[in-house]
Amino acid sequence: MDAAMLTALGALLASPVAAAAAAYGSRGATRAAREGGVITGYDSLTARLTAERDKAELDQAAAEQRAAALELEVSRLRFLVTQLGGTP
C-alpha cells in the first residue's frame, strides 16, 4: 500500500465520523437555542406577571382610598341630617 492509498482510506473513514460529529453538534446547538428561548419566554412572562401584580396593588390601594373617602362623606351627611332633626 502506498501513501496515496492510505490517505484515501483515511479520508473515507474520517468522513462518516465528521458527519456524525456535525450532526451531534447541530442537535446540541438546536437544543441550546430552544432552551434559551424557553428561559427568555419565562423571564418575559415573569416580568409581565410582576407588572400586572404591581398595577393590581396600586388599583387596590386607590379603591381603598376612595372607599374611605366615601365612608367619610356618608358620616358627614348623616351628621348633617341628624343636626337638621332627621334620622339617617
Image (tube, helix red, strand yellow):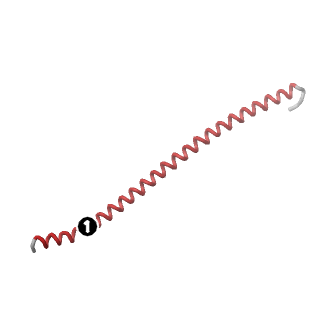
Q: Is the C terminus in the top left, top right, bottom left or bottom right quadrant? A: top right
Residue at x 68% of width, y 36% of height: 64
Please indicate whether residue 65 sits to the left or right of residue 24 in the image: right
- Farthest residue, direction right: 85
Crowding at label 1, few (<14), some or many (≥20) Cα neighbours within 10 Å?
Answer: few
Residue at x 20% of width, y 69% of height: 11
Q: Is the N terminus in the top left, top right, bottom left or bottom right quadrant? A: bottom left
Quadrant in which residue 32 is drawn: bottom left
Q: Name the residue under label 1.
A: 17
Residue at x 61% of width, y 42% of height: 56
The amino acid type found where label 1 is placed reads: Val
- Farthest residue, direction front: 4
Please indicate whether residue 36 sits to the left or right of residue 23 in the image: right
Query: Residue 31, image x and y in percent?
Result: 39, 59
Query: Residue 33, image x and y in percent?
Result: 40, 56
In depth, the one of 80 and 11 nearer the eye is 11
Query: Residue 53, image x and y in percent?
Result: 58, 43
Query: Residue 14, image x and y in percent?
Result: 22, 68
In depth, the one of 8 and 69 nearer the eye is 8
Disc 1, SS:
helix
- Farthest residue, direction top: 83
Residue at x 48% of width, y 52% of height: 41
- Farthest residue, direction bottom: 1
Please indicate whether residue 39 sits to the left or right of residue 88 in the image: left
Looking at the image, how many numbered discs can be counted on the residues? 1
